[in-house]
Amino acid sequence: MISRLKTLAITVLGALCFAAAAPAQQVENELVLITPVAKTLTDPTLADFAAYAKERWNITVKTSALAAGTPVAYGRILEWKGRPEADIFWGGESALFDKLAEQKLLARLDLPAAVMDAIPATIGKPKPIYLKDPKGFWTGTVLEPYGLVYHPKLLQRLGVPVPKDWDDLLHPKLKGNVAQCAPSRSSSSHATYEVILQRDGDEKGWKWLRQLGANTGIFTARSRDVPSVVARGEFAAGFAVPSYMAFEDKLAGFDLKFVAPKTAWITPEPIAILAGAKNPKAARAFIEYMLSERGQRVAMERGVFPITPKFRVQGAPGSRAEMAVEFTGGMRSYFDLEVVNIYDDDKAQKRYEQVNEQFRKEIESVWAQLKK
Amino acid sequence: MPGLSRRALGIIGFSLIWLFLIVFILYPLTRIFYDAVSNEAGTLTLANFVEFFNDDFYMRSLWKSLVLGVAAVITTSIIGIAVAFLIIRYDFPGREMFSYLTMLPIILPPLVGVLGFVYILGRAGTVNILLMDWFGLEHPVNFMYGLQGVLLVETVHLFPLMTLSILDSLSKIDPSLEEAAQVTGAKGWRRFWTITLPLTTPGYISGALLVFIWTFADFITPLVLGVQDLLAPQAYLNIMQFVDRRLFRMGIVISALLVVLAIVFVVAARQYVAVKDYSSLSYSRVERRQLGPFQRWLAVALLMLLMAICIIPQVGVVLAAVGRGWSLTPFPIHYTWEFFSQVSIQTPRFIINSFLYSGLALIFCLLIGVPMAWIMARTRAPGRQAMDALTTLILAIPGTAIGIAYIRAFNVPLPFTDTALTSMWIILPLVLAVRRLPYTVRGSFSSLLVVHPSMEEAAANVGATKLRTFKDITVPLVWKGILVGGLFSFIMSIQEASATIFLTLGGWEMIPFGIFTFYIAGSQSQAAALGVILIVVCAISLYIVNRVAGTRVGGLFG
């Protein structure tokens, strides 16, 4: 008798639970990112998102990030041909997101208007940097510059002043001490090459880049290797992006600093849902979370800047947020200042292969002579 | 009709093996060749190759790759032959220990070796910092960044292949040949040049071929050292940037070219060896000579020096794994276990996946490889020559090419399902098994050859059934060979990165992929910690191999 009652009670309870859980079933229990963004940023945001999903929907979301440089991520998405192994593509250049959208490999975001309206359409003059896609396929998540990393102690050894602008990399005493990644291998390096070319014009720009080639001690395989070799002190300075790992080295205890020259290009770290994603609801929820104050706060502790003027990087003294402010030279929000942008992405994308070809001809294949 | 059904069973098994080889080796390779001779629109063209051969940079890369490969063969020959002779012909203190230690460099996982070297010999490595701090050197000595660094890493990593191959041939030389030479007056160097050396030619050639192709196909070492004008790094770099589709296509073209060149080298070497194979099949007991007291310690001192150089990468990696923020000091200042804890206790999946996938790969290798060896050694089945050639070919195909070939070939839904093989984790053990199959086949094959069929026949004559013969006669005689081959497949699987790097999806990460992700995410310390774990796992496995097989591992590479 008792056991029958028990069974009944369990059945009723079970049914009630099921009924209660059904409407709250807002997201799938899995989420996969493919991203060039470093683990220091993806791990904490994913972990906190999982906690948030647990609180809000009582669902345990199994999250994971597939680490891949921007070009590799882009290539894999192409190869997946609409049957993606990830739900979200996060990070890199917005032009690639536009290309993916054209090929129908992205799903529309369809986020609440209030969320999207908090993000300004563009930042920077004279050339605007788009912070979200007018067509609604991607949105920016955080802001960060493509700038320079350097090793203060090694520069001191070499007797070279701390760099402030691109031109400081041409210092004669830095010969053999600059690390860079070829523009044909890295989209962030490519963007920085374009910044120089668009700042100086083609002729002077290539001359400048050849001089940089002469100072270069290593061409790394990926742009992320640049902060690695600089952090170790193998080389003294080079191009880098904070969340692609420069800040990670700082957190790992290395003596490394970052500076964004005035004309450095700023990426909004676009994010998009892949068409055909297995977990579209979780993907949408993650993006909404990233744009919320909670998500932005987590990101701000990792050396990147908020995407909306609503927040500024701020924390208790000695906190990661304050370390990040110190690492990036004291700035707290890009909306505090006049952002200069001379980089025209349309122009860059139209001649993408041509710049690579010219790099091969003028720098890569004659590097040995340049160094003499 | 039990005879017929057994025959049918044999045919089914034989067909299944061929099906496996065709689906998982020949088909993907065909796919990559198709990609190499077609353009984005899918029309057949040779334009890609024309572009390659008209491009100065690519031609220089090809030339430099060939030079580097030859240089590595020379350096590994000098070290490898010297070590092999010392170990097999002479007695000196610690001989047994050195025969194990000199095998160890082979288990340097990709990336870990070169990183370890950079920590010690890099521009900010221990040696340069000491030179600058103590001896006032102004600019660091460039040990590493350039071809010289690549050659150093490859030499240290690969000389054991040479040693093992030579050891194998040396142990197969019939001592009576050398005695005959001695009697007829050929002594010392003359005997060495005219008798001993020619007898080791087949082993030497197979070792040299492996060193050459390995160096030729390695992209990781040159990339870390900033040497990009070599063929393998160009293939990798071009493929890994997917944005510029023309460069991407060139990457595939170069991969296909690497495969073609590897095939050419293998065929050439086989032709050469076929003419010169004098070795007997059985291992002979080798008489060891006692060295004089001075020579004895000289031998020990030389081997110790060699070991000191070989241990550089391990020392570097261990220091990096326990050091925090190590930069511009000879040794780390702050020490921590946090990196080990992060990569093992906090995220055990690298280790679990590694054992799971390599273990499965080992099972595949045994299921496919042992029957293959049996067919090759015991039957006259048609196509067994092709099987043999295919086994050698697999050894020669660069991992990058296989990875790319798999991604191009298996990214279509499997028949009757809507899932592609590339989205199922089983593809990792599969690709590992294919890549490392030759070791199992060779190991089993050589021990099957040593067991004369007459022993099995004798058992059958006294009434033992086939199964009983197999269980009581064949297995006890050949299990060592199978075990050694299998374990070697396992060791090489668990270190594999070049093919899996293209195929790994979230959650499938093995240790080498973890090393890569940590490295490219800038967490070199975590990468180093994983590297140390992998080295320890492999060292233990290799120790078992060494205990079981002694010096006979070399036969695996033939």
Image: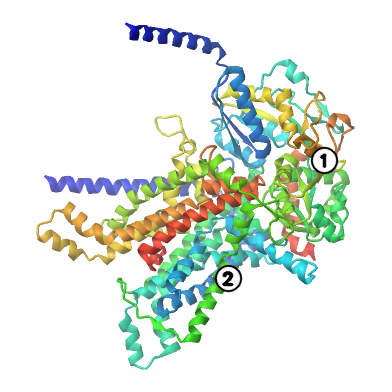
Regarding residue B25, the answer to whether it shows in the image is no
Do the CB atoms of the residues marked 2 and 1 lie less than 8 Å apart? no
Instruction: Give the chain of mark 1.
Output: A
Q: Residue sitting at 14 percent across and 60 percent down?
A: B459
**Marker disc for residue B542:** none
Horizontally, residue B475 falls left or right of residue B309, namely left
In front: B472, or B342? B342
Instruction: Inspect the image, locate mark 2, and give the three-letter code of the amino acid beneath it.
Output: Ala
Q: Which mark is residue A326?
A: 1
Q: Is residue B250 left or right of residue A318?
A: left
Image vertical order of residue B145 relative to residue A122, above or below: below
Q: Neighbour class for label 2 at 10 Å: few (<14), some, many (≥20)?
A: some
Secondary structure, mark 2, is helix
Q: Nearer the viewer, residue B541 or A191?
A: B541
From the viewer's perspective, is residue B270 above or below residue A189? below
Where residue B54 sits, quadrant-wise, is: bottom right
Q: Is mark 1 on a helix, strand or loop?
A: helix
Chain hosting mark 2: B
**Residue B176 position (above or below residue A132):** below
Image x and y of residue B152, in percent? 60, 67
Q: Position of residue A162 (x, y in %)?
A: 86, 51
**Residue B71: which disc?**
2
| CA neighbours of label 1 inside 10 A, class few (<14), some (14 to 19), many (20+) | some
Give how far apart the Cα atoms at labels 2 and 1 are. 49 Å
User: Quarter of the image holding residue B357?
Assistant: top left
* Residue A10 seen anywhere in this rendered image of the structure: yes
**Residue A187 in picture, x, y percent from top left:** 71, 43
The quadrant of the rendering that contains the N terminus of chain B is top left
Residue furthest bottom as drawn: B185
- Callouts 2 and 1 on one subunit: no
Q: Identity of the amino acid at label 1?
A: Glu
Question: Disc 2 vs disc 1: which is toward the camera?
Answer: 1
